[in-house]
Image: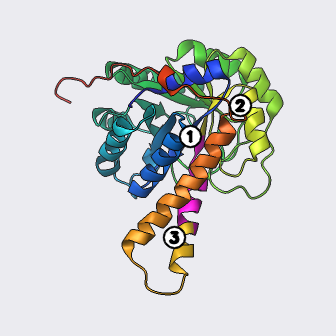
Amino acid sequence: MLTTLRELLEQAQKEERGVGSFTCANMEMVMGTIRAAQEEKTPVILQIAEGRLRNTPLDYIGPLMVQAAKDAAVPICVHLDHGLTLEKIEEALSYGFTSIMMDGSRLPLSENIRVTNAAAEMARRYGASIEAELGSVGGAEATDEVEQIAYTEVKEAVRFAKEADIDALAVAIGNAHGHYTGTPKLNFERLKELQVAVPKPLVLHGGSGITDDDFRRCIANGIRKVNIATASLDALTEHAREYLSTEGSHNFYRLNDSMVEGVYQNVKHCIRVFNMGGRAVRVDSCKMPGIRQLSGA
């Protein structure tokens, strides 16, 4: 069932849990993620970042993700992560994506608000949701350039939430994309301040490498969407490596199965953590909104 980010996060807020947003760089990642979501009877988000489209072209992966979401037995949102251009955002929306992110975090605050609202106007015409980012999540995801962490300022977040038409806000509290060089030190005091001050669901990027206990602590303090990319990519790679290291002959179909299994195991574990101790998730409570496309799109 295809649904929007807003629908999923509203339900997660009521149930005080987090929603996993899982990168899908190929068909195997889509299959493993959907399999885990259906088995756990839990809605999830399928995502791909604009900065990764040279490896995973949007016109290939986009329709695949949307069709998989439509066919799934649980509500699924399809999301463009770290959108950098309005052109690519509209392309994703034209394929049926139900959520986009405009990443203007490198821009001055006023410019970030302006470009976010331009993207929001486009997304609303398609009936889609929009996420934005404030502060600088470290590491590299939107591009290959490694960024330094800059905490989200509470005063700026309040203004951003008031002036920008958004459904969710990604915040920087010490989290980073990619592999952490040490144990992540998250600023939970800043997160608590943001939870109180910002009337929007908060998003945690750079989830791979954060401990299960810290995930639960983040969700208890307002995080409603958790992005997972590196952990799923690593799980796929490791399972493929393990299969190819076994004795005897190998073939593509068993290799395919091993990659799906790796992603499935990682996503299943994340879902159980984000559901905060096995709280029941009512999949029938996430209503499927009327998603529409622009005429001629």
Q: Depth check: 252 or 154 in front?
A: 252
Find out whether residue 229 is within the magenta segment: yes
Q: Residue at x 66, y 28 (%)?
A: 17
Q: What percent of the width, then of the height, locates residue 38?
A: 49, 41
Q: What percent of the width, then of the height, locates residue 125?
A: 32, 19
Q: Earlier in the sequence, mark 3 or mark 2?
A: 2
User: What amino acid does circle 3 point to?
Assistant: Ala
Q: Earlier in the sequence, mark 1 or mark 2?
A: 1
Q: Which mark is residue 240?
A: 3
> Is 196 left or right of 72, judged from the image as shown?
right
Work out how far the residue at label 1 is from the one at label 2, CA to CA, in angstroms. 19 Å
Q: Which mark is residue 50?
A: none
Q: In the figure, residue 289 lies in which quadrant?
A: top left
> Is 256 left or right of 57, judged from the image as shown?
right
Judge whether 113 appears above or below 187 on screen.
above
Find out whether residue 197 is within the magenta segment: no
Q: What percent of the width, then of the height, locates residue 297?
A: 21, 30
- The residue range painted magenta reads 227-238
Q: Secondary structure at mark 1?
A: helix
Judge whether 191 appears above or below 148 on screen.
above
The image's colouring method is: rainbow
Q: Secondary structure at mark 3?
A: helix
Q: Which mark is residue 219?
A: 2
> Contact, CB < 8 Å: mark 3 with mark 2?
no
Work out how far the residue at label 1 is from the one at label 3, CA to CA, in angstroms. 24 Å
Work out how far the residue at label 3 is from the one at label 2, CA to CA, in angstroms. 32 Å
Residue density around tag 3, few if under 14, some if 14–19, many if 20 or more, within 10 Å: many
User: What amino acid does circle 1 point to?
Assistant: Glu
User: What amino acid does circle 2 point to?
Assistant: Ile
Q: Nearer the viewer, mark 1 or mark 3?
A: 1
According to the image, label 1 marks what residue? 40
